[in-house]
């Protein structure tokens, strides 16, 4: 039995949550994947997975084995990448995870240029709204977090973006333009449904001065629409349904064209940082480093390019935000 192949197959089955999807990802037959995992379990003398007709789950032994397998496969990939640094052209697969907004509006517009520079590097881009729990599974994870973000990961801040209130000119012509935050409850609210532990999930909406002076203001504002899709919020705002808060990164082109107007320009919903998070490993593959350096070219307002713990990154982002406010 090819032990290295069996570990790769086992990890893929665990990550995909099934044999059929793992087979498609690995370009193998489902029967071959099933036989490989069964042979691995026989070799180890332990059941790694519980299989039913409806779901697949790891046993305690499987969870422990998966953790070790990830580390081993990462080390092998690192060794191959380190050797490849002596080769002129980068190659291999870069496994990337990103939030939907960052995938659509930060990464996708740059993929053609990246591919032209490094045609032998394959990008595998997975999308999740809240990817923090899967950072260990990918070469690099892109996420947007506020200044309170703190976790035991290695993170590189790439850029800072404000969350701003905006609406279509048609809506503002029909409903009027709010002059102060206290005017907002008289308007139609299109709200993003933040997770419960985010600090933004309550009924009250908290705004802070864009310039950094003065204190925050909270308004009790009942949403007419609440969704976990930023694209839905953008579409409904463009159609004149109401006022919403969106990243300036997402709406910049619409503001420039005049299809959206920033509301309450002296106030923001918050200031967030785009992070590139990596699994805690000693060696960063050359293709990962090249990809981060490439993206930094498009983010001149980003913090210093060095990697750091998220605690240090959050402090740097906070200092950067205060400086921007001045």
Image (cartoon, grey):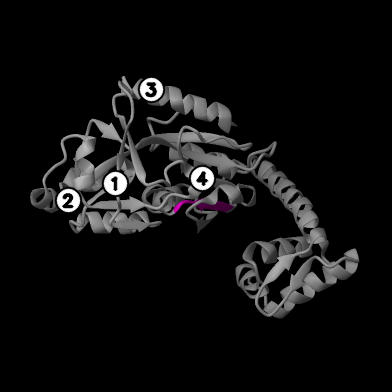
Q: CA distance from mark 1 to mark 2?
A: 19 Å
* Foreground label between 1 and 2: 1
Write down the quadrant of residue 207 in the picture.
top left
Residue on which disc 2 sits: 168
Which residue occupies 33% across, 25% down?
Answer: 215
The disc, 4 or 3, on the residue closer to the chain's N-terminal end is 4
**Image coordinates for residue 255, horizontal then vertical, percent:** 20, 44
> What element does badge 2 sit on?
loop
216 and 100: which one is in front? Answer: 216
Which residue occupies 74% across, 46% down?
Answer: 75
- Mark 4: give few (<14), some (14-19) or many (20+) Cα within 10 Å: few
Which residue occupies 42% across, 49% down?
Answer: 102
Quarter of the C terminus within the rendering: top left
**Image coordinates for residue 155, horizontal then vertical, percent:** 56, 36
Residue 197 is labelled as 4
Whether residue 256 appears in this view of the structure is: yes
Residue on which disc 1 sits: 221
Q: CA distance from mark 4 to mark 1?
A: 20 Å
Which residue occupies 68% across, 41% down?
Answer: 82
Check residue 44 for magenta coloring.
Answer: no
Residue 322 is labelled as 3
Q: CA distance from mark 3 to mark 2?
A: 30 Å
The disc, 4 or 1, on the residue closer to the chain's N-terminal end is 4
Check residue 98 for magenta coloring.
Answer: yes
The disc, 1 or 3, on the residue closer to the chain's N-terminal end is 1
């Amino acid at each position: 039995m090819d032990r290295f192949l069996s570990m790769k197959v086992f990890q893929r089955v665990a990550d995909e949550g099934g044999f059929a999807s793992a087979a498609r990802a690995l370009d193998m037959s489902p029967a071959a994947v099933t036989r490989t995992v069964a042979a691995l379990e026989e070799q180890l003398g332990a059941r790694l997975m519980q299989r039913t007709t409806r779901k697949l789950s790891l046993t305690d032994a499987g969870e422990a084995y998966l953790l070790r397998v990830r580390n081993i496969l990462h080390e092998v990939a690192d060794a191959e990448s380190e050797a490849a640094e002596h080769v002129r052209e980068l190659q291999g697969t870069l496994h990337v995870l990103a939030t939907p907004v960052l995938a659509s509006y930060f990464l996708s517009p740059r993929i053609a240029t990246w591919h032209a520079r490094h045609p032998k590097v394959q990008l595998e881009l997975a999308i999740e709204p809240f990817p923090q729990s899967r950072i260990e599974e990918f070469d690099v994870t892109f996420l947007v977090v506020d200044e309170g973000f703190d976790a035991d990961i290695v993170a590189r801040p790439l850029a800072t973006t404000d969350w701003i209130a905006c609406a279509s000119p048609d809506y503002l012509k029909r409903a009027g333009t709010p002059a102060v935050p206290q005017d907002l409850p008289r308007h139609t609210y299109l709200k993003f449904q933040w997770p419960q532990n985010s600090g933004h999930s309550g009924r009250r909406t908290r705004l802070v001065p864009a310039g950094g002076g003065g204190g925050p203001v909270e308004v009790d504002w009942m949403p007419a629409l609440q969704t976990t899709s930023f694209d839905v919020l953008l579409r409904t705002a463009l159609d004149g349904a109401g006022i919403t808060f969106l990243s300036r990164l997402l709406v910049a082109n619409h503001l420039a064209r005049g299809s959206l107007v920033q509301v309450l320009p002296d106030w923001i919903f918050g200031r967030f940082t785009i992070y590139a998070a990596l699994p805690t490993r000693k060696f960063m593959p050359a293709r990962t480093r090249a990809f981060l350096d490439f993206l930094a070219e498009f983010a001149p307002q980003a913090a210093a390019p060095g990697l750091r713990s998220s605690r240090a990154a959050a402090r740097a982002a906070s200092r950067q935000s205060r400086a921007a406010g001045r």
